[in-house]
Every structure is written in structure tokens, then in C-alpha cells.
Amino acid sequence: MAGSSRLSCEDPKMRRVNVARAADFADGDLRQVRIVGTMDGAGDGAIMLAFIDGQFYATGASCSHYSAPLAEGVAAKDKMHVVCPWHNAAFDIRTGQPVRGSGLEAIPTYQVSVEDGNVIVQVPYVMDDFVAPAMSQRDPADERVFVVLGGGAAGVAAADALRQEGYKGRILLITEEKHLPYDRPVLSKNLGKAYDPASLSLRDEAYFKKHEIEVKCAARVKKLDAGQKTVHLEGEVLKYDAALVATGAKPRPLPINGFDLPGVLALRTPEDAQQIAAACQPGKKVAVLGSSFIGMELASTLRRRGCDVVVLGMEQVPFERVLGNRLGEALKVAEKCGKTSLLFLSLLFLSLEGKGCNWKLYFT
């Protein structure tokens, strides 16, 4: 915790705060420091203080994705980035700009000095957790067209990056979904969010309008002609100068009899999540096919809803292919303690049979 140093500051909206002793830091250290309010109206806040290659840097304390504490992350000093401990978003500790991953907003940066062995940080009276990244505006004289195919996090990040890097031509983001780009990974963790897709939006309509990023929803691309540089939609052909395909992936249907029966559901969209929530009421027996991130997250979500859940996987332990056997075994034990049944027997699914609420799944 740090209190105000009560030293004068040229900017009346700023204050200087003594946050630490310089000698207490080793190279690569990241620490979160609370900034307390003062009687003259300065508000509370928090910063991350980093010591890299003999120099101190101060930024906002939280990742702009899910507000994870950045001080628990990693300092990539070769690139002067701090990497979020949760989802690998990265921010430049000199500018606060997002440089990778799911953090779309920038984090604030603060002036730092070392005086008589004390680390002094200059912070505003009102501290914001996040700040808007620096963006260029479209120039009507720039006739270039950049098309982004896909309305997920990657598509939005690409459109943002273009404006952040100074691109002033037309940006057109095309998505087949009827929603503005949204945070899809939330769906497996919180089915209830699917009933309010706007609450999942990565950017709102006002943001796209302000930065002149055109979003075309409910538009299905029939053809991309790279030679002619055209995108073919239903009843429309668009010319472009550059295109990025960021359509993501869809769930793989199991190549077995019965997988298309009613009650056999996949998860990708808010509408899918609504169907799953309606079908999986408390007390229902649910089989989740797939033992990686989406399957295991959904199993945990359904268990919290009061469902009797069994996870069927083609691996020996969950996450085996991405995290390895040792960590997968630990997660398997933890999931069993949460009363989710797990079968990891290198299963080969053969067929599904049933109707109504009665189902049989055959596997070897």
C-alpha cells in the first residue's frame, strides 16, 4: 500500500506517490501496489510496478480482458511486454498498448522516478483501470479496402490493429452471425449469458461507428476469389485490396449414426447455448462428448446447474493432448471431487440411439 507523498506537482490533476523502495526490487520483479485516496479528493486505485533491465515502469494493475492481476503474470523483457497470467494477453509496459491476445483496451502508464532510493509514481487524481488505444481515423481520400471475414475476437482484434497501426482506408468486417462480435468463450462458462448476447459484445455499435469500422452482420460469404480480389455474398460482390480470413472453427460432428438426432447438441453460438440451457435442467443426466477446454468447461457449468454429468473422452485424461498426462491427471482428480463422472478410455464412439429423454450411446 502506498500513500500520497504530498509533494507538489505541476499538473493540478496529478499527484506524486511514494510507492516502494528501489532496493527491494530484483530484475524482472512485478508487483501490484495499492494507491490510497487522500482527503483532498484523490481516489483509490492500483498500479503494477515492474523493474526491467535496471529501470522501473508503472502501468495499470489489471488485464483489460477479465481484469486478471498483471503482477501475477510474466515480464517478457526482450519485448518489454507483460503477459497476463490467465489468457496470455500481452501489453507493452512502456505505452500500455495491447500487443497480443484478448485484451482489447490499453492499460494506463505512469511516469516513474527514483529519488533518494524511493520509487515515485505520478498518477491522476481519478485513476482509470483501462484506456482507449490510440487509433487513426479513416481518410476519405484513401480508397483502399481491407475486408475481415469473421466476427470473432480475432476479427475484431485485426480491425482494431489496423486503425492502431495507422491504416486509414475502409475496413469492412463480415460475419455470418446476426450479433455484433462477441466473447464466444464465455458461453461454455455461463449459459445464462446467451440470453443477452449484447452483454457479450467485444465492441458496441458506437465504437465501430466512431472508428469507421463497418460491420456487416448476417452475411454469408459464398466465395472468396483471391485472384480477382473479390468477396461474393448473397446478391453482392465486393472488391478489396487486402483480406483476412478469421472465421474460426465449428464443432466437429461425430461421424456416427444418430449424431443428428434431436437432443444431441453442439456449442458455438448464443442460440446453441440457449438450446443447451433449455435441455439441461437440474436433475437431468447429461453426457458431454469431448474432454478438452470447451467440453470440460461446459461439464463444470452443467454440474453447477444441478445436472448429473458424465464426460466421455478419447484421451486417457482430460486435456491430455494440450496439457499432457501429468496435469491432466490432476485435473481429472479435481473434477471427480466436484462430482462429475469422467470416462477417459480412448473411447471410439459407434452410435447413438433413442428419442425423447431416453438415449443410449454405444462405444468401444
Image (spheres, rainbow, N blue to C red):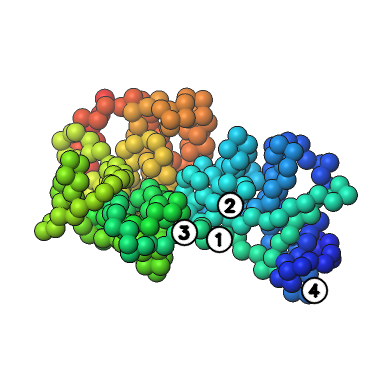
Q: Of the residues tagged 4 and 3, which is closer to the observer?
A: 3
Give residue 278's mark.
Answer: none
Q: Earlier in the sequence, mark 1 or mark 2?
A: 2
Q: CA distance from mark 1 to mark 3?
A: 12 Å
Give residue 96's mark.
Answer: 2
Q: Quadrant of residue 311?
A: top left
Q: Secondary structure at mark 2?
A: loop
Q: CA distance from mark 4 to mark 2?
A: 29 Å
Q: Of the residues tagged 2 and 3, which is closer to the observer?
A: 3
Residue 196 vs 337, above or below: the answer is below
Mark 1 Cα-neighbour bin, 10 Å: few <14, some 14–19, many ≥20: some
Give residue 39's mark.
Answer: 4
Mark 2 Cα-neighbour bin, 10 Å: few <14, some 14–19, many ≥20: many
Judging depth in this view, the residue of 15 and 153 nearest the camera is 15
Q: Residue at x 65, y 64 (%)?
A: 127
Residue identified by numbered label 3: 135
Where residue 129 sits in the image (x, y, percent)?
A: 60, 60
Q: Secondary structure at mark 1?
A: loop
Q: CA distance from mark 2 to mark 3?
A: 14 Å
Tell me the amino acid under the disc marked 3. Met
Q: Earlier in the sequence, mark 4 or mark 2?
A: 4
Question: Is residue 304 visible from the viewing direction of this image?
Answer: no
